[in-house]
Image (cartoon, rainbow, N blue to C red):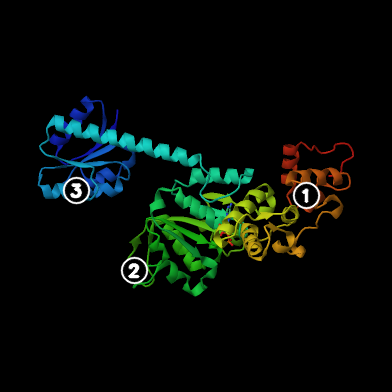
Amino acid sequence: MSHILIVEDEPVIRGALRKLLVRHEHSVAEADSVEQAREQHLNQFDLIISDLRLPGEPGTALIDSAGATPVLIMTSYASLRSAVDAMRQGAVDYIPKPFDHDEMLLAVERVLKEGRLNRGNRALRRDMERSYPVHNMIGDSDAMQELKHRIHRVGPTNTPVLIMGESGTGKELTARALHEQSERAGGPLISVQCAALPKNLQLTELFGDEDSAGRIEEADGGTLFLDEVGELNSDVQSRLLTLLTHHEIHRQGSLSPRKVDVRILASSQLDLPGRVAEGHFRQDLYYRLNVMELTLPPLRDRQDDLQSLANALLARGCEKLNRHDLYFTDAAWQAMVGYSWPGNVRELENVIERAIILTEEDGIGPSQLGLNPNRTPQRVSRASLDPSEDLSLEDYFTRFVMENQDSMTETELAQKLGISRKSLWERRQRLGIPRKKAGSRR
Ligand SMILES: Nc1ncnc2c1ncn2[C@@H]1O[C@H](COP(=O)(O)OP(=O)(O)OP(=O)(O)O)[C@@H](O)[C@H]1O
């Protein structure tokens, strides 16, 4: 049984069509104008059959509002011209009035069947996307898996998303992934670096002026990503609130509103709730943006991803710089594991690219990485690290923990390894190195 909306102002024709469809086991809703039709959730219907000539707007005006629901147009002016016009505007088919019952039923069944096929394909595509990693986003740690899962869930919606995280953790990459997973993927993704905009230019840049469109209008039909949204001045903040509430903007100096259809994604590395509490950021806007929040963990808290990230970035860098067969020596791995990566993935990317340029041999060592020891948590003792030994990262981890756990607390162990306590605990579980209970220090 399919759910069909009939839009027809002539009660006799509407009644006859309703009877015909109900007899063939469809459920039917009715409206006598486009305006009345729009009062219903149009995408709940499997098909809309609408007369072309109606009081008020013509039936074809429903095509845009109907989204994925097909619109079949009936016209008593079955001139080729009006039929072609209706099809050009996106009608799925047209049918002349007075209609023949069989002809109508055939058209209805054909359109419904195509709709079922399309929905099936969409579902299949979504399923396939679900089983593939988010495009270009590397990492399989628990935190990254959870993030990718949430991107899959929230991507296809129209909800604003606030992406929080330190610099270089992948906030913009996440915004890109959300856009790519949405129905808006075919539309533009406009990124605005709010921190780079002088405060007095923010309004014009975003909302445009009488002569030219701003970034928001450029994003019409797509996604607007506001990077470092906490940097926007209060005037821009209140206009953004209007945009989120009414889906319209005023260009600078213009009194007439313009409708825009944009999804807003925002990011911040600042403590945004803190900025709200201090009165620097509007609370109502914060709540509007924060319908869904994604928090990206710093690299130091997901060292499980370090190895796959470093290898992937090495491969990417080699391709870009036309180098082949490079690899990290064990000492390089140890240096990377022991470093705290304050600049996160971006820093890792830069360090690796520099190392590829500097290295003359195939093996990249610590000296080519050039990690600044002042930013590095205290290194592990040389005694436990014999570079001549071919230790894997896991062997190294196990050895270090076994050798030092009697003399160090868990916090000290984690610090020296450059990982969080949670990550230390997880690795202990995975590698089967339980904590000593009796007499162990916390
Ligand atoms: N999980 C990841 N996999 C692959 N590359 C990543 C990942 N996370 C970040 N990157 C890369 O690191 C760099 C920094 O990422 P991005 O610009 O998204 O970070 P950001 O949090 O927006 O940074 P900022 O706050 O400084 O603007 C980019 O080149 C991005 O491609």
Compare marks 2 and 1 and give the one earlier in the sequence.
Answer: 2
Front residue of 327/181: it is: 327
**Nearer mark to the viewer, of 1 and 3:** 1
**Residue 29 falls in which quadrant of the image?**
top left
- Residue drawn at x 42%, y 40% is 125
**Residue type marked 1:** Ala
- Residue drawn at x 58%, y 49% is 138
Query: Residue 259, image x and y in percent?
Result: 34, 59
Q: Which residue is mark 3?
A: 86
Compare marks 2 and 3 and give the one earlier in the sequence.
Answer: 3
| Res 228 seen here | yes
Q: Is residue 108 left or right of residue 121?
A: left
Front residue of 181/6: it is: 181
Q: Determine the secondary structure under disc 3.
A: helix
Neighbour class for label 1 at 10 Å: few (<14), some, many (≥20)?
A: some
Q: Which residue is mark 2?
A: 255
Neighbour class for label 2 at 10 Å: few (<14), some, many (≥20)?
A: few
Query: Residue 197, image x and y in percent?
Result: 51, 71
Q: Which residue is mark 1?
A: 414
Neighbour class for label 3 at 10 Å: few (<14), some, many (≥20)?
A: many
**Nearer mark to the viewer, of 2 and 3:** 3
- Does residue 134 sit above or below 115 in this rendering? below
